[in-house]
Image (cartoon, rainbow, N blue to C red):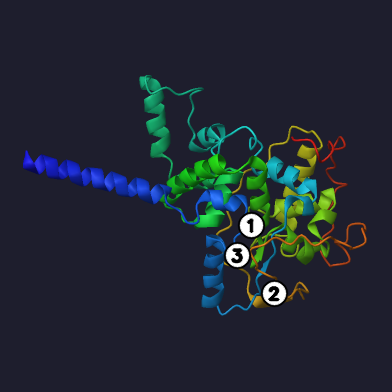
Amino acid sequence: MHLLRRVAAGATVAVAAVLLWLLFVWPPPSWWGTHWPAETAFMAMRARELRAADDPTPLRYRPVPADSMTPWLARAAVAAEDDAFYQHHGIDYHSLREALGYRRASFSWGSAKDRAELGRALGRAWERRDRLRGASTITQQLAKNLYLSPSRNPLRKLKEAAIAYRLEWALSKDRILELYLDLAEFGPNLWGVAAASERYFGTPARRLSLDQAALLIAALPHPLTSNPASHPARTIWRQQLILRKLGGEPVVIPQEAEDTLPPATAADTATHGDTTTRADTATTPDTTKDTTKTGRDSAAAHKLPKPDTATVPPKRTPPPPGARI
């Protein structure tokens, strides 16, 4: 009996430790309601990789509030990365079910057939890990960027889900989307739509056209291996799907696994004519009013690929940016 009590006490402590590990993060998610991070866990990981490779690629990161971004960025991100963003609470169970390969229309713990199918699907989860990574919601991706890493460990995915729930509880949908766009990786040591807009198009994020916004968002799954300045074919192909979906076509945009290749070297970056200096990493957003004269898309002027929107144009004009898709 004494042994059983010791085993039970040990099991209780172990469960409590696991729950504490799952739930504890610092700063707490509520902190991000009014603050921007000076550095995220993902940024720190990339910085270590660059130091290990003796790569001097400068950090470019400048968070800005949502009113300093064109609304097309948010609309394109939701269309491409998480079209159920405004319906779910951090986890999109429909996408998760498809990624797992669960074949029944519903699930109930009281159904032996449902439990058997779930067991079969979970047993193949490792084989379908790329699809599972691609099924991450915008909130899950934000949780990963803020606190975690691209590790394939199932426990890391479990912690990501727990953090996603906490972010949804603590923050509004609009704030989650704002943070996501400010912290996403868009190229080697390039973070957030403000820095990426200046880097790739030479214009502030609020001045981006629909084509440019879609091109930028199209790079999100693979910013290190295909972006507007490096090997852009894959990004342009994805951009066309985003434009068609925003135009009202019933297009399915493939959910791609996250980019896991190492950053480009300094030599690779130099070939693209980058002369941007190191960005300010202050935790306060840049709210300076833009005085740049509005102009047409400047992709060609910056030696970047001009989107081929004539190949597969949207059939209809997209709804105005103020509407949700």
Count numbered badges in the picture: 3
- Give the alpha-carbon distance from disc 3 to disc 1, as whole Å: 10 Å
When asked about the image quadrant of residue 286, the answer is bottom right
Counting from the top left corner in percent of width and height, residue 189 is at 64, 68
- Say few, some or many: other residues with alpha carbon within 10 Å of mark 3 (under 14 / 14 to 19 / 20 or more): some
Question: Left or right: where does residue 325 sit relative to residue 37?
Answer: right
Question: Left or right: where does residue 192 sit relative to residue 31?
Answer: right
- Give the alpha-carbon distance from disc 3 to disc 2, as whole Å: 14 Å
Query: Residue placed at 62% from the left, 58% from the top?
Result: 36
Q: Point out the image quarter for the N terminus.
A: top left
Question: Residue flagged by tag 3: what amino acid is it?
Answer: Ala
Pointer 1 residue: 183
Query: Residue placed at 55% from the left, 43% from the top?
Result: 170
Question: Left or right: where does residue 199 sit relative to residue 34?
Answer: right
Question: Is disc 1 placed on a helix, strand or loop?
Answer: helix
- Say few, some or many: other residues with alpha carbon within 10 Å of mark 2 (under 14 / 14 to 19 / 20 or more): few
Q: Which mark is residue 278?
A: 2
Counting from the top left corner in percent of width and height, residue 220 is at 66, 53
- Mark 3 or 1, which is nearer the eye? 3
Question: Is disc 2 placed on a helix, strand or loop?
Answer: loop
Question: Is residue 69 visible in this depiction of the protein?
Answer: no
- Say few, some or many: other residues with alpha carbon within 10 Å of mark 1 (under 14 / 14 to 19 / 20 or more): many
Query: Residue placed at 84% from the left, 36% from the top?
Result: 319
| Residue positioned most to the top | 111
| Residue positioned most to the left | 1
Determine whether 123 is above or below 286 in the image: above
Query: Residue placed at 53% from the left, 33% from the top?
Result: 93
Question: Left or right: where does residue 111 sit relative to residue 136?
Answer: left
Pointer 3 residue: 38
When asked about the image quadrant of residue 282, the answer is bottom right
Counting from the top left corner in percent of width and height, residue 275 is at 77, 76
Question: Residue flagged by tag 2: what amino acid is it?
Answer: Arg
